[in-house]
Image (cartoon, rainbow, N blue to C red):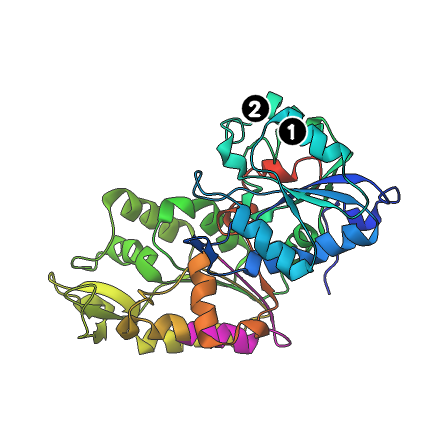
Amino acid sequence: MLTTFMRIKSIRNLKSLRGKTVFLRADLNAPIKGRIIKDDYKIVAILPTIRFLLRHNCRLIIATHLADGKATTKPIAKRLASLLDKKIKFAGDYNSGRLAKLREKMKAKDIIFLENLRFNSGEEKNDSHFAKELAKLADLYVNDAFAVCHRNHASMSAIKRYLPSYAGLLLEKEILNLEKILRPNQPLISIIGGAKIETKIALLNNLAKKSYRVLIGGALANNFIAAHGFKIGKSLADKASIKIAAGLIKKYKNIILPVDVIVAEKVNSDHAVFKPVNQVKKSEIILDIGPGTVKLFAHFLKTSQTIIWNGPLGYFENEHFKHGTMSIARLVATRSSGHAFGAVGGGETIQALKMTGMEHYIDWISTGGGAMLAFLGGEPMPGLRGIVK
């Protein structure tokens, strides 16, 4: 077991917690369709922190954003109440007078759930006035929203000027587990897929320095393949991204690319063909890694002591182009929990992993997508400032 090299101000170590009113910043940005929650994973993930605070007779004011700035958090509050088997008071707006009255009536273990933080324009502007109004509601601030710690928003950053601030149990676990990637047991094998290379430059630079091998797949690989001078047909890529890939190839010699690919002439095609990476026709689109690449990647994964995976390796939403991603998902799951420490993050990556039914074998599934990229890439994390050192 690795020891932490970051100091975390955790509620676990707070001696004067009992009976406090806590502003709990959660990330409960669950997918909602017609007020029905499609996946409550993030809601379930924060339950240990809530239960810990309730055991200490705290009053809780819980706040979250939703990606849809116009969507209400009422379904989230309702689902949380069901999971806790506890009544939760929903505050329908950010009227300071009304919130103050609700706060005055709170008793030990009461919970107030706030409306979507992005209903207030001050949230995304990191507005001090809005942060101060939120801070007036509580005695201390607890951040358990790792997935938005890379955002410089009022409920993540400015609020900490006005309240003593601590990490929740989920945030603490995120940091402790992702630290194992930053200080890995070697060999570290990094698997990076997805589409947008510009969002992963810092991650690729940082992980390439620490990894024995960096395995590249998905649409991301198209840029690297093109940078080597091979034809990629109508595959997703652009000149700026190809130039970035060329620079990374020149700088790092441990980047491993697909040796064969699955192609089709249309994204929604049911006719898939696998071929060597240097034989892609002008009319074809690369939509998955091929069996030879899976075998090559498996060779490196079998040597790993630490694994980090972010980004699918193909267009896995289509039955005909999911096999590369599914194969690597199973390999990562098989290697994790004993043989190596395995961490996975990113919404699509987790979605793909769940399709295998083997997600419970992974040592750590991060709740953060962009935040995980930022943390592992050494980028600024405003939400951690003053809480993690």
Q: In the image, is residue 70 above or below residue 34?
A: above
Residue type at tag 2: Asp
Q: Nearer the viewer, residue 130 or 362?
A: 130
What residue is shown at x 47% (from left), y 69% (from top)?
353
Determine the image quadrant of residue 45.
bottom right
| Disc 1: which residue | 98
**Residue 233 location (% of width, % of height):** 16, 59
Q: Depth check: 253 or 350 in front?
A: 350
Q: Is residue 331 left or right of residue 53?
A: left
The magenta stretch is 327-345
Of 165 and 52, nearer the camera is: 52
* Local crowd size for mark 1, using a 10 Å CA cut-off: few (<14), some (14–19), many (≥20): few
Picture quadrant of residue 317: bottom left
Instruction: Give percent across and percent down for residue 236.
Output: 24, 54
| Left or right: 303 as drawn, with respect to 328 | right
Residue at the spot of label 2: 127
Q: Secondary structure at mark 2?
A: loop
